Structure formats: structure tokens, C-alpha cells
Image: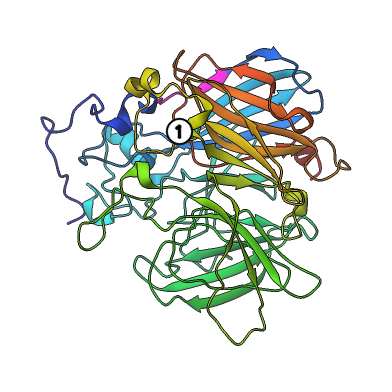
Amino acid sequence: MAGHFRGTSSQVGKAFPNSPQFSGFMKPCRFEGDLKFLEVEGDLPEELDGTFYRVMPDPQFVPFIENDPWFNGDGNISAFRFSKGNVHLQQKYVRTEKFLKERDAQRALGGKYRNKYTDAVEFKVRTTANTNIFYFNNVLLAIKEDAPPFAMDPITLDTIGLCDFNGQLPSLTFTAHPKLDPVSRELVCFGYEAKGDGTPDVCYYNIDSDGKFTEVVWLVAPVVGMIHDFAVTENWWFKAPNAFPGHTTNAYETSEGQIVFDLPLTDKNVFFWWPDANGNAPSPHDIQAKYVRFTLDPRASDLDLPTPEVILERDMEFPRIDDRVSMKRHHHSFFDMMDPELGTDFAAIAPVLGGGHPLYNSLGHLNHQTGQLEVYFPGKTHMVQEPVFVPRSDTAPEGDGFLMALVNNYRTMSSELHILDTRNFSTARAIVKLNIRLRAGLHGNWVDAKEFTSH
């Protein structure tokens, strides 16, 4: 039962296990600090004035759980600050209850992923805050969907504390993928297992730009299951059959009253380390997500979803759009892709890849009007992480701007930030050299510098 440590000092090692999720490029980083004036190759766009925030699961202590999944690590925030033609890196852990108690005990205390009954001590709020980092109402929200977010100072990265929105948060949980309405500036959110572990309750809520809750709706899901991401249109909210959609691109309403919903979709269990009730689990090499489009008639009598149209026959994930058109018709999207035919030298990088995390070797840009696909391939010994899009200016056309993504360079065993100009997508405009290694992250977002001075 919780409260009893499940290991002795002889059982809990000082070194991380030599398993794939803790070795090679996936060896925990555990770095906090500042790196000023990062080395830049190429032409850094002068329009970039702001900060790219991203978060990675990064355990500060060796786990006492055997074969612990890689994303069970503590949330470690990276901030790439662009200013006056320079890039600076700042990195700091989220000071969650778990992080602070483990630092005081000088050992791991948290147990299995999403299983509080395996912990060495009891936590009031168990989260690692390691899935997304989102700027809203003057603070950063470090989010994992099993708890409320932790608020952080966007300039210092100091942890302010658990955020319940001044007592307004009705749910025990908060989505890892809140959606910001670009017109009203409302934040649209939800929490699943909203009344506690194993509960079917889903709580949906809107938060205005000043942090006031304007709408709260309680729903009951037909089954208790993970609801990681969602999409929002002006008027609707839908439920779908059980599937593994991963992440969403965007949804919008047409002038004919239909709903268009784009997303990567796979029929296999992406969390392959959790087999089904019969012990079946797919091989990670067999898991691929196609890019699909659902077109829905919200007034149809048939409640079954139609078969989606495949809009791109590529293994892809982590789609992003120009957030200025969120919840409206989008004409461009950007994403990670895996294309073995591009020439990745898998034999050379296999010994240092690490494992447990998805692998993508290129970035894609799909023009949804013409169907044209542009591809950026960073090199034969590189893999890409989730991209973010930055508009060239407030008035630039949709999709005109810059795409940036953290890239793993397995030849140098260090991380790089690649910056692409969408006007010449296939070639990097600038490569920021970190000369340190940051393991696989989950999600991140760009915050323009004017956001820090507009309040």
C-alpha cells in the first residue's frame, strides 16, 4: 500500500538502467541552468522575437520501478529565447510536489506511470507536469492531464505553484492540450477522470482572457479511457468510437454546415508497452499513423462516424497549424514524418538511438488546397521532435513564417534547433547548436515577446 517504500538501498541503484528508454540519446539529462548566445549556423530570421518553450520528461532520480516508461520522468522546461539576433537557452524543472519530496529524500519516491498504489509515499497531487507548457494569462502552465497544471513565471521559469485558477477549477484534472480561441482569446479546456482516478466523468470548461471561468459542462464518458487531445469548432462538440487518434490538427465548420476534422490516426495501440487483456501488443515498428480527414454532418440521423478520407499516405504525427486560424478553415499544416526512403543511416545511429519514444526523420508541410507536400530532411543521422509554427508577422498570410523543431543529431550526440522558412521549406535557414543533449520531449509552444508586455 502507498506509504511503504518498495525497495532497500541495495535494490535502488545510483545509475540509470541500461534499458533503451534510459540509454543512448534517451539517457536522462537532468540539466538546469542557462546557456547564453548559442552558436548559430545560417541566417537567423530577424522577425523571431519571443520564446519557444518545450517540456521533456526527465527523471531527476533513478526509478525503483522496473522498465519504467520514458515519459514518466519529471517535467523539465526548456526556453529558447530569441532576441536581437541571438538565441539563449534557459532550462529548469517544474517544482511539483513529487519533485520536491524526492529531492528532499534524495531518491525516487514515485512509482509506476499513473498508478499511485506503487508510490513509496503518498502525494496530494501526484503529477509530474511533463506533457505540455502553455502560456496563458501572464503565466506558463506546465501540464500533465492527470492533475491541475503548475503555474510558472515565464521569464524566470520559477514555479509559482499548483494552479486552480483562484479556486475556480471544477475538475481534478486538466487537459494537456488546451485550445486558445484566436478571436475571443478564451481558453477551451477539459479534464477526463475529472472526479478522480477511474471515474468516467469529463468536465468541459471555458476560461476568458482574464482567467474567469465562463462555462462549465459535466459529461459522462461511456468508458473510462485516455482522452489526450481534442479539437474545437465554433458550435460543436462530438464523441467518436474508441480509437488511438494521438493528436489533432484542427477542426472547422463549412458554409454548408458540415464539420471537417483533420488528424493522424492509427488502428494500433501506440502505447505498445501496455498490452491488452490477452497480452497482445503491436511491435513499435508496425505502428503508423495516416493523415485523415473526417467530414461530419452534425444533423444526420446516423450517429456513426463516416469512413475518413486519407489525405496523406505517410507515417506522420505531431501536427501543427498557424494558430491564428485555429477553429477555422486551415489551408496549411506542419508535422513530423517517418520516411525510410529518405536515406537515414539506421545502422550507424541504432546503437545510440535509445528507445521507447517515436522516431521521425523529417518535417512535412501539406498545402490542403493543392495537396502539395513539402519535406525537410535534416540529415542521415538526425531525428526530429515536434515542430512549432511562428507567423512572419501579425498580418502575414496563413502559413507564411517559420517552422522550428528540436533535432537529435546522433553523430554528435547533441541537440540542435532547426529553423525553416516556409518560403523555402526544404532547406534550413538557421541551425542553432546547443552542444548538449536534450532527450525526447513531448509538446511546446511559441510565445511572441509582445505577449509579455501586453498586460
Say which residue appears at 61% left-offset and 68% top-offset. Answer: 205
Give the camera-side residue of 425 and 126: 425
Applied colour scheme:
rainbow
Decide: few, some or many residues near mark 1? Use Cα within 10 Å; few <14, some 14-19, many ≥20: many
Q: Which residues are magenta?
A: 29-34
Name the chief secondary structure element in magenta: loop
Quarter where residue 411 is shown: top left
Say which residue appears at 34% left-offset and 43% top-offset. Answer: 284
Camera sees residue 286: yes
Give the camera-side residue of 32 and 236: 236
Residue 337 magenta: no
Give the camera-side residue of 35 and 314: 314
Say which residue appears at 49% left-offset and 41% top-offset. Answer: 442
88 is higher (above) or lower (below) than 385: above
Tell me residue 2's x, y (percent). Answer: 21, 54
Give the camera-side residue of 135 and 417: 417
Tell me residue 380's x, y (percent). Answer: 50, 20
Quarter where residue 167 is shown: bottom right
Camera sees residue 155: no
Callout 1: SS: loop
Tell me residue 16's x, y (percent). Answer: 26, 27
Residue hosting label 1: 440
